[in-house]
Image: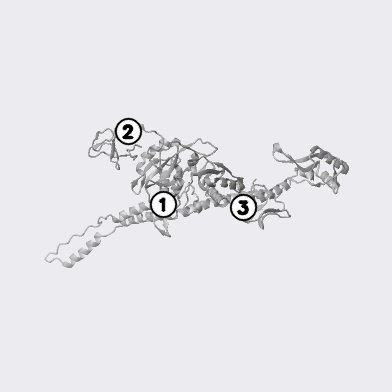
Amino acid sequence: MVQCPQKHTLRKQPAKNDTKCDSCSEIVKDDSEAYRCGACDYDLCAGCFNVRKHQQKPKGTSLVKQGVLKKSKKAVASGSGVQASTEAFQFFAFSGFPVDSDAYEVFCLVQQFVQDLLGEFQLSVLGTTVSDGAMHVGVRYREVDAEALDKQLYDKRDSWVYNTAFLNTWTVDHPEVFVAPALGTSAAAASAAAATASMDTDEFDYFALGPFVGRSSDAAVVSLVREYLHDFLGEFSTEVFGISRDYVGFRIPKGQSEDFQKQAHVKRDSFVFNGQVLLSKTVDPAEVGAYVLPAMAPGSPRGDPLSQNDPWSKYMPTKRSEGAHSGMTPDLDKKRLTLDEFLTVAVPPVLPALPVPPPLPGKDRDPMLAVILEGVNEIRANAVTKDVLKSYHDKLSDEFKTYVLAETAPLHTGMQHLSEEVAATKSRLSQLEARMDSGQSGPGTSSRRAFDENDPAFKQIAFTGFKIDDLKVRVQVLKEFAASNFPDIQIANVETIMNGPWKGRKATSTVVMEFFSRDSRDQALEAAKNKKVLDAKGQALDLKIERARTRSQRSRNWALRKAEELAKVHAQQRGISGTAWIDWTMPVRKVFVGDELAFSQQRGELRGSFVDKFSSLVLPP
């Protein structure tokens, strides 16, 4: 885009009154191609304009403004902190909105620009800011698209209009000053938010929480982080500034940073997503611009972002004040203007006036006939045809339809989201029912225990309570015990149960003795009843002798302990008081938080079910 010395975009218009080129001083003949800035009375001929156009760099938008919006010296990498990005971004702004404009309205208008006229580019609308007596709306774009985007911005320059005034585009150096507005945000509030956002980055420390892998939407995880910061770290002045590459970024004043990090470390187990504890990392201030807040949904709690794929987003909601309609959307305003023009334009008479008839031969003109004729002609002059009525009806219907769509857009959006949630819930229930019918276990199911005849535990006796560290001595002690108490029963194997990761496994206090059949195991167990195992020195060991636990028993016990762990975290997040504990009493084993029942496991169930306030929890597979 070629500019005048004051950085205004030159617009093409035919030369008039022997226009003089302010570059080469040549006179441009009337009606010849020329380019002009009306605000500065600056003109260029076509030749000088093309020379300047080809001298410009192809990257980014070509207009530069001093102050808050400056020429970007480098692209901002997508991602943050530790991870480097292969994709870079730059930023520009639509400028020229009156300073007293409704921030939410202009924000939505630019979203329509981006969706309808620049849909081929991956653009994100950042928010609004106020400076130099005007309001600006920031947009992020990929650096690789800079040249093509610059051309589209110029080719469609006549489309960037707000209230009949043309808008300018500026390259942005500080994208962090743009704040996504909520419904009804005033210019003063937008200016205050921008002033807060534009504070020196040295006054804040920046962090990110994640990774949010498998999230349903950016909106959901941004809302979740806001809730976590409010519920668990509410004593600190935190502010979420966007999401990038699975991490949600937030900032905190440097004076609170040290205490914040200590508290965040203490409460680190409270930050959970999809059953996984989230990690935190620091963010370089230079990378903050890569984090983008999704668009805000009107009327949603905490300003939760609205889905970018919302089919009703093109119908901009009307403004409301004290419950009464108090503003027009751009679409509705166009319809109202069209109807007003139709009503104010004089409709030519569709029925011509009747001529005055001549008097009958031999008689004078009847004065009463003239009066009647005058009345008839007045009626004919104001007559409305069916076509006129139809046109009026069509325009009135269009206006009313647009008004209803604008008023009900938030309702349709909410119903769209509810329908998606209902469909997902039905699908999940169908899967759970299918698992229960087939007897399979899976996340969240409570399948019945299946008998596994190949489980080695059915042929094993467990000796629990060993304090001997030497595993070979344990084996020798048990072999001597078997030779003394059931010498006629052949032993298949004796080994200590190990626990822990594969390369760091440690011995437990339990040793199992395996036999060749279940019957042999039962005979040996009967013979060992009330007998003492002696060590090498002949001293009795305090051991518990019983059947070894089967896979299903171990699975049931694991489910109870895991349920206790999840219930504890959930109770902390939701402010439910009480200590998590397990009631092992059969036939129904339970997990409680204080006196509140959280989980129950019926006899024969491999897993169990969360109940009441904890029903949203699911055991991992």
| Closer-to-camera residue (340/111) | 111
Q: Amino acid at mark 2?
A: Asn
| Closer-to-camera residue (584/472) | 472
Kindly indicate whether the residue at mark 1 contacts the one at mark 3 (C-beta within 8 angstroms): no
Mark 3 neighbour class, 10 Å CA radius: few under 14, some 14 to 19, many 20 or more: some
Q: 516 above or below 424? A: above
* Distance Cα–Cα, label 3 vs label 2: 67 Å
Q: Which residue is mark 3?
A: 572
- Identity of the residue furthest to the front in this view: 255
Q: Which mark is residue 50?
A: 2
Q: Residue 256, position in %: x, y?
A: 54, 47
| Closer-to-camera residue (155/440) | 155
Q: Which residue is mark 1?
A: 188
Q: Secondary structure at mark 2?
A: helix
Left or right of residue 334: residue 181:
right
The image quadrant of residue 464 is top right
Task: Give the mark, 3 or 1, whose residue is nearer the N terminus.
Answer: 1
